[in-house]
Image (cartoon, rainbow, N blue to C red):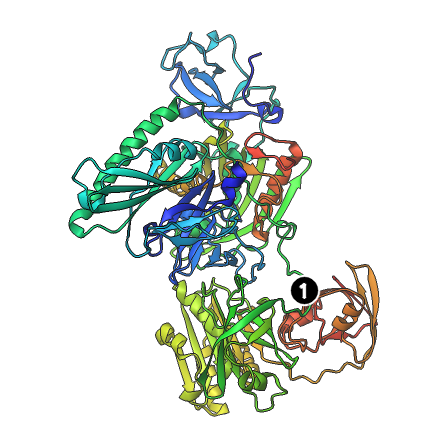
Amino acid sequence: MLEDVRTRWHPIAATDDLPLRHVFHGQLLGREFAVWRADDGYVNVWENRCLHRGVRLSIGINDGRELKCQYHGWRYSNRTAGCTYIPAHPADAPARTITNRSFQAVERYGLVWSSEDPRGDLPVVEGIGEDDLLVLRAIPVNASAELVAQRLQSYRFQPNSEIAGTGTNIELVAATEAAVALRSCQGRAETLGVFFVQPVDSGRSVIRGVLSGRPNDAQLTAVLRYHNEALSKLREDLEREAAALPVPVPIEPIFERVSEELASLPELDSRGRKAAIRVQVARKWQTADGIMAFELRPIRGLLPTFQPGAHIDVHLPNGLVRQYSLTNGPGETDRFTIGVKLDPASRGGSQCLHDSVREGDVLAISEPRNNFPLRRDALKTIFVAGGIGVTPLLAMAQTLNNQSLAYELHYFAQNEQQLAFSECRQALGNAVMPHLGLSPSDTVNELRRLLSPYLPDTQLYICGPNPMLESTRSLAAEAGWPEAAVHFEYFKNTNVIDDSSSFEVALARSCLTIKVGAGQSILEAMRDAGVDLPSSCEQGACGTCLATVIEGEPDHQDVYLSPSERASGTKIMTCVSRSKSTRLVIDA
Amino acid sequence: MAKTRCLDPVVLNLWHPLGALVELPVDTVVDTVLLEERLSLAVGLGREVAVWRSCPDFVAGDKIDVASVSKSLPAKVAFGYLWASLGSPPDELFPIPEYEETDRRRLNAATFGVNVSAPRAIENFLDMGHFPYVHTDILGVEPHTEVKEYDVDISVERDEILATRCRFFQPLASSASETGAEVEYIFRVPHPYCSVLYKSSPVDDARYDVIAVFMQPLSQESVRAHMMLCILDEDNEDKVIKRFQQTIFGQDKPILENQFPKRLPLDPRAETPIRADKSAIAYRRWLSQKDVRYGVIPASY
């Protein structure tokens, strides 16, 4: 019986219960929901519990894009319900899989519908037009849904245009355990009333009535008051009747356990270079000279949660794999937007996207990975973008903007026509500062000015072509920026990789020892031995294939690790770096 | 022996706080609740105490000679509070040596009713990550949200949890300072329902203020929280000090009462821990090891 009820659709709120930036406390079958509408209109129905410490999310903050828990400020994204930020660890990207339980939502007949485990579509109600209806005030009743639905069959009401009259004819149009449809006719006046019963718990229900036809303004109050009084009377009778019955046992909601992986402290999960997600190019447009923007929408279901700074692998029709940063702001979870600059020296990646890929095409992409996480505990954040390097920084800037945190985005380009994503930049206003047409030496002078003096609690994020990135990093160091406050992402590794060495690698967790020969990377040797490690760019720039070194001396050839990370000897990028010692022990 | 509603022998055999001595009228019957049992208590002029299961012979407000109570439960005075037990408690309560230091102010800052289990309330007391969000502009402020690495130890010999090297940015570190600064904390959990916090003193670098919370479990899902202060402060009036702590407590209360489930789940997979929760993880494990069942949802179903 309860199983049947769980698979059915039930109304849990009126659409009017979800005004701008509100979080509504919904209830169904002993379970609580946090129900909220994002600014893009999407209705989220979530388990009413933060996954961290169980605090109700219905007391959280709806900022229009994300829901923030009151207790520790964890942020959960619109649509995906994935956690995008954990303030207690501002330097870490949260594991993508910290995702709250969400339930389907459909808006129809002025109500929001959901279900624990829906089978099939929401049933269609004949005679109620989506644009011409009146939702009555919800009437909570301390009685079982079954009893309420039974007694509703004898509910009587006047048609809207004869609301003050008496003696109408009532016809029972339909009745189920969950709803009753009644037609009231008096002469030519006719109103269909459908009364849905929301089972809140075993002994508690809510009557949600919907009438066909919205009365004119003069009658509206009278109709609302009429039903309010009549249904309140029904409620009193029902509660008297229910009070004489044995009290039903309340329904205990079952909370899903979090995954084993999350119960221990979060770590990256192990995936090879796979492209599990299929997206369609919904829009392709020229956003600047030589730069194409692509809006990618999921073929079915939802896209996974991303964080600012994240990138995806795009598997191209020509077999190449390329990495692109997401430019999306928080809560923009119905699509991924990337910018692709045509590289004159293209080996086929950007060329293919510019020339061959069209709107409507399907692409395979990886889940978003974040090796360039954004801290949000700075008093001020400075972003330095060179050309197409602006893409991850736009996502970051929108995030800080949404949280009203101080930042500046300095965008270096040759001229106005080379500035990409103008709509996004305009929304950010004066915080975006273009620096146009500067010579290399003027660029250096300008950067020196921007980066000095270093003030405590300031963070710097740089993304751009290698020479600019290198000089920004050294200017920051000159100006006294601590290395931990300087974050960077290279487009590519321009170092010439020396892969002539051969050595032995012991994989501590897998209890395997493998040989890495000349011309072969550690990553390749591991995969040959059946040990999978996530990777993305495979040229030492993106940071995905990072491994922990337990013993031995790494031969670093990447551009991802900072000098102190390199010096510590505890980390290695397995796609390009090698070993100076004959044996390297890594935690894999 | 009367039947108790609480069937957890570990919790029955603990000492539990029933109220601050200075707030109890002398030689007068006072009613309270402990572990769903109605209890009555009285304090004599010489701080002699008696606690018994409520009976119609003595009603709240009656005058009584404490020495005349024959069926008293185990009862004692410690840290300015009256403690009692429904089982066979150990001789001694956990120590707080600083309480004996004569230059300290010692007071009950507040007694607050909270509709949450005692372990949830203790876990909140150990938690620093919520300071910027719940105690905004007092104990923390955005964007200074980072919980830095700290150390947690379960001391076998003292049977208590100790979290050290805890540091957190506090916007007004003391009444003497205008700017924010990092404050150092040490947390002890020497009793399943009690915790003691040491916080660097604004007046003496070498010493700590001591703030303790003693939970009186009314039921599995409700407590009276008693907050004891033992601090170095010669300037402020009692009411100023109390008001500060009551503000903090008042901010925690609505959060705690919105935690779900109200009992603390001990299954490691019931909730999602992060590194900042090391002390909470140790606390949950310690409760499991002690086989505490009251106020928690045990790990094994």
Rendered location of residue A407, percent (x, y): 42, 70
Placement of A574 over or under B290, stated as above or below: below
Q: Residues within 10 Å of mark 1 (few under 14, many from 20)?
A: some
Counting every numbered tag in the picture gives 1
Q: Quadrant of the C terminus of chain A?
A: bottom right
* Image position, residue A145 (x, y; %): 42, 35
Q: Residue at x 47, y 59 (%)?
A: A79
Q: What residue lies at 53% left-to-right and 72% top-to-bottom?
A: A280
Q: Secondary structure at mark 1?
A: loop
> In the image, what residue type sits under mark 1?
Arg
Which one is nearer the viewer's eye here, A313 or B35? A313
- Label 1 belongs to which residue? A271
A500 shown above or below B191: below
Where's residue B187, x and y in %?
55, 42
Above or below B136: residue A311? below
Task: Kindly give the residue lying farthest to the front in the view shown.
Answer: A187
